[in-house]
Image (cartoon, coloured by chain):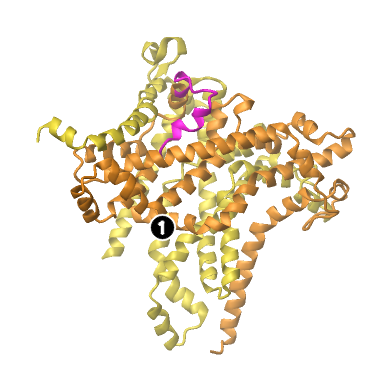
Chain colours: A yellow, B orange
Amino acid sequence: MKLWVLIKRDKYLLLMFAPIFVYYVLFMYLPMPGIFIAFKDFTPGRGIWGSEWVGLQWFQQFADSIYFWRLIRNTFLLAFYPLVFGFWIPILFAICIVEIKNRAFKRFAQTVTYLPHFISTVVIAGILINFLSPTDGIVNSFLSGMGLEKINFMMDPRWFRTIFTSSEIWQSFGFNSIIYIAAIVGIDPELYDSGKIDGVNKFQEVWHLTLPSIKPTIVILLLLSLGGLMSVGFEKVYLLYNGSTYETADVLTTYVYRMGIESQNFGFATAIGLFNSVVTFVFVFAANLLTRRATQMSLW
Amino acid sequence: MRKSPIDRTYYSLVYLITGLAVLVTLYPFLYVLSVSLSSVSAIDKQQVWLYPVDFTLSGYKMVLQYKELWTSFYNTVWYTVVGTILNLVATCLAAFPLSRSRFFLRRKLNFFIAFTMYFSGGLIPVYMLITSLGLYNTRWVMVLPVLVSTFNVMICRSAFEGIPNEIFESASLDGANDARMLFSIAVPIIKPTLAVLGLYYAVFHWNNFFSALLYLGSQELQPLQLFLRRVLVMASPEIMQKMGGTTSTGALAVSTLQVRYVSIIVSIAPIILVYPFIQRYFVKGITLGAVKG
């Protein structure tokens, strides 16, 4: 068919998509050439194309600075610790939840534990900072009540990862359990019936029947979360860190924010942002590849 | 059926772990609520650790008098309502054409939007673009740059694709055009999916802190989250003094603690009040995402 015939036939579909097209061009595609700022000595007066090329100068400067390894290490660890210390908690919680016979309690437990997922990062950070405050926080009141010394948690770089990791797990374990609950509920009941005939107890049932049945789900979710290992969320770090904890808390995104938005060092910040995107992309790509392999294997 | 001793141990463990999980999640909120409802002297003597001591609403009276709280509350409601409505309209407008197998640009436009999930300009170029568009310090900056989420468009698209084609065929025999099909047939059918997407968009807007941090300098336009940040994270002394309104420094220190905790309760109250009723939609949302694959 000729183009204008197609246009005429689908005119309403085209009209519908028109505003969406404008949106994507404006907010998604127009900023893309801005990536070249990473290779330029950008001055706002001269624009992206008028500014001078500097090649890989910004990348070189970043790689030579003390920030390079520190930021990579922090970015990685703040995603890695919640994963290794936290991934098993939603599984354990899901196994327990499906065993609860009392419907009201079951519902209550689920409602309560999913809740933190919907609370804003600002409130979570606010609760943490206020609970851990050395002057009027409940944790330090408790410590001094026990005759222990008060700890200035938020100012001590040694505490940052612990605080970040544990609150991350606290926020997400309930909500993350949903998918495991669905997987456990979906297990064929006949499997358990045959287990009962063989006389297995409940612990053996979990170990030999439940866990092997949801193993594919666990493997897929673990592999997918590998993709997020270099992309820890900006907001929580930004709200929790301060000058005295940069050593363990500063991550690539917060550094980009400080360099770019606060210091208006656009070229340098764009370069680090680009570096972060490339690294993230590699991780996501590898994770997707591994997941695809694993799911194909589990199909055969 | 009688349970063996080992199975009884198992069930005790199950209830113990679940109870512990509930306790650990609930306690911080309970403590914040209790401090917000206790008298300043009881807080000062550190008597509050679980339930309110000397129940009083004076903390709420102090905080709710503060004009800036209401301004930011109003702003957040505005961003959430306007933002969510625009999100839903735009998501349908994007998803419907992409779901029609007949549409001659379908493949190209699917790629056009999917591409942005893997590749973006990054923080600084987007920031420069938005400021150069004149959106800095306007209400629209909270709404327009986040008009649709590509992921949600894809979920909505598969919901449209799930509608049996016969329905559309008979409608077109009756002379309905594509616009009518979308608004009178397709949208009503996928209402449950749209409810889930709407909830997720609404929670996003309610909690959106990042856009406001980047693009809203004016206090008149600031959402609740930025206000909370100044109260809770920066513990801005100027706000504390205005809200606390007490003169003696000792009493001020304690009442500012209460001001902070009251602010937390005020800001999460809407979510906590609505959330239990719509929880099942959120849970459904997870399975929607999984179906998309």
* Residue located beneath label 1 in the image: B287
Residue at 50%, 36% (x, y): give it. Answer: B82
Residue at 84%, 51% (x, y): give it. Answer: B46
Q: Is residue B135 above or below residue A292?
A: above
Amino acid under label 1?
Thr
Which residue is at the far left? A1
User: Is residue B137 highlighted in magenta?
Assistant: yes
Residue A278 screen position, x and y as percent: 39, 35
The disc numbered 1 marks a residue on which chain? B
Magenta segment boundaries in residue numbering: B130-149
Which residue occupies the foreground of this view, B201 or B88?
B88
Which residue occupies the foreground of this view, B35 or A267?
B35
Residue at 13%, 33% (x, y): give it. Answer: A5
Q: Is residue B277 above or below residue B88?
A: below
* Res. B23 image quadrant: bottom right
Which residue occupies the foreground of this view, B34 or A96?
B34
Can you see residue B129? yes
Determine whether, in the image, residue B52 is placed left or right of residue A160: right
Residue A52 screen position, x and y as percent: 39, 12
Residue A285 screen position, x and y as percent: 34, 44
